[in-house]
Amino acid sequence: MIKLYDYELSGNCYKLRLFMNILDVEYEPVAIDFYPGKEHKSEWFLKINPLGQLPVLNDDGFVLRDAQAILVYLASKFDRSGKWYPTDQPELLGAINQWMAFSDGITSTSSAARLHDGLFYDFDIEACRAGAHRLFRILDEHLWFEEKQGNSWLCSADHPTIADIACFPYVILSEEGGISRQDYPAIRRWTDRVKRIPGFMVMSGVFPAGPAFKQQNQEMSA
Amino acid sequence: METLQRNWYPIASSSDLPFRHTFHGQLLGREFAVWRADDGYVNVWENRCLHRGVRLSIGINDGAELKCQYHGWRYANRTAGCTYIPAHPADAPARTICNRTYPAVEQYGLIWSGESPDGEPPQIAEFDSGVPFALRPIPVNAPADLVASKLGEYTFQPSARIDGDGATVQSEIGPAGCISLMSAEDDVASRVLFFVQPVDSNRSVIRGVLCECPEPPDEHAVLMHHNQRVSALRDLIEAEAVKLPTPEPMQPVIHRVSEELASMPQQTLSGRTAPLRVQVSRKWDAADGIAGIELTAVNGQLPTFQPGAHIDVHMPNGLVRQYSLTNGPGETQSYTIGVKLEPDSRGGSQCMHEDVRQGDVLAISEPRNNFPLRRDAIETLFVAGGIGITPLLSMARALGHSNLPHELHYFAQSGQHMAFPDVLASLDEALVPHLGLDPQATGKQLDKLLGGYEPAMHLYVCGPGPMLEATRRIAAEHGWPDESVHFEYFKNTNEIDDSSSFEIDLARSVMTLQVPAGKTILEVLRDSGVDVPSSCEQGACGTCMTTVLEGEPDHQDVYLNESEKSSGDCIMTCVSRAKSDRLVLDI
């Protein structure tokens, strides 16, 4: 059985819970007292991850850290459709990794702002927010032009990939760090689409989208 | 500021309102929730739920209603009236719970609105000759007047020379204060109009529209070209704006609920007012002997209705009759009723069938809901007999739209007698017709249908009196409690015994009145200048229900169920009387 070292309010842990739910993979969460206990910096946990970061996955003794790396592992091992991380399509694979690296930028800005506002971390909040807005402008522009070309997702494919899962959490949680998404209408539409992926689940601070079956049917028949 | 509030501004692109999405807009400091219903109507609303002030822009657009994320209050397409409050599932929300709406006009690929704009949005002659083509809107952290002044320096290539760099650009102030720029190179030229949306004192959106849609293969390159150029200009403007003192954010006035809405409604001298004027926009045969009548507002917007609601129709011959609305959720542009021609008509249905024609104007009451639909049932059964389909049709459409489990059992003489076949077809497998059954066979069928009662199931029945009685009796036999069986009679066929005489004490009005034999409580109240609302005035609709504080009522209505009647704490003043010498009423 897979073990996920997990913190309920972490967006990086959430993306793995979300993806395992989409793939219908069973796992056992191990709750880590990230705040206020700082258990991820405890001696016992540093033996599992010397970086002292969540999440960490343990699949029958195979231990892996880094949310994006774990997404790659889960997709490669459990995704029977082969679409979430298509290793046989070089361009798509490159784009997926480009946007997964981008998601680390979102973590270091949007997530940092949220840690400052919610868990009292001592960060330069204005720099965090400005950095997130700079990335969101790039993301909104990219998604707007993808839409114009008929693409719904971060990477040019007719289906979502793990890049969408990697970027979603700290975009949708940005308002908890005082970062409004009002100026990013294409991002707002994309988050609606992510919320309509079969198997989508929420976490605290993430609201569900309503159904849009008719549109999907129309698109399928079109 | 006040002059700005009278202007029309583009606040979104048409493409910002895809299927079942809610757009987050803002103009002059005021936030909007903007959403397109499935019927295409664009709603621009104050971005706060009337309940706890949560932003409606994070709410769920279900195509007919917008649902608040926080406590699930639902607001209807067009009217923004509240249709359902999950914390009060058995009650009909007051009609006065209505969000603030702003005008919305869609033209040139943009959604136009304003705080309280004059007239119509600007008609722009430059767009008449071609197909306007909206560019990617660019938000800017700078005041609108600074943005507008800098847009005069914008340079770009004509659409047909997008890769060149030798275009000459001329700018001028265009219609509606926009910045109009013409770019020419060789023998080709393009014109772009920029509208600046003042989001707040220090925030704007640049909304550009090309007067002519580029040839299809060039569209993408043209959009990229302008996006890159406007973004570069945006960076310059923002660099300039940070050097200026940051203006205070605008403080839009969040309007308080008006006195009239917040207080109890004014009492009127007649219980049956008809404040609305509607035109018969369509009249057709909805089934054998049933006229479908569509009523459209003569002026403005019809008020919000809820499934189960009815209206009073004041007819040309002076009669007043109640008809249930059959509309589906969000279908707020007209009211549709079904009228069966009664062979023993006392003039009501005959008048509606024979005298009322398309184009006629009628007076109607606001919709009133004494037959509210719960949406928290684990399963809902609807049992309709004949024309009793009308309120249940509206209810089944509401539950169907939200994918809530329900079945609509429709007892009718034949297929030709089933009303509104086109709407029935849209109900799919939820509709179960039972055709041509005699009373005995109907009873058997009901016995089968009502067999599987479980807690939190609800039954709604409407139809002729004998069928209603049978359904209620059979439901009770199968263990359905009174509070799970909801019914509405067309009329009260009980023989009214008005021979008693008694005294009524009005606790709030501090009056004591005598009700003599031959007069109703309602009539005595009105004779003494005390007004109470009423509608059918025969003990069927529930509008005149009044709380009883003391005394034993003599119930003669068909609105209350047995437990409500035996509790003795409410009374229909239009037909019911007193068994005791005295009744104390909460009036």
Image (spheres, coloured by chain):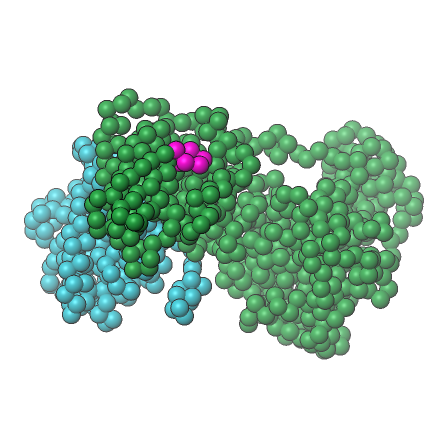
Chain colours: A cyan, B green
Q: Give the range drawn in magenta.
A: B173-178
Tell me: residue B164, above or below residue B153. below
Residue at 76% in and 49% down: B362
Callout count:
0
Tell me: residue B566, above or below residue B524. below
Q: Can residue B351 be seen in this view?
A: yes
Horizontal and vertical percent position of residue B388: 71, 63
Residue at 72% in and 61% down: B283
Horizontal and vertical percent position of residue B287: 71, 69
Horizontal and vertical percent position of residue A141: 27, 48
Check the picture and name the quadrant holding the N terminus of chain A: bottom left
Res B151 → quadrant? top left
Q: Is residue B260 magenta?
A: no
Instruction: Compare residues B360 and B419 and report the one nearer the observer.
Output: B360
Instruction: Compare residues B73 and B173 and report the one nearer the observer.
Output: B173
Residue at 22% in and 57% down: A163
| B571 lies left or right of A128 | right
Instruction: Compare residues A100 and A25 and report the one nearer the observer.
Output: A100
Residue at 23% in and 36% down: B235
Q: Can residue A119 be seen in this view?
A: no
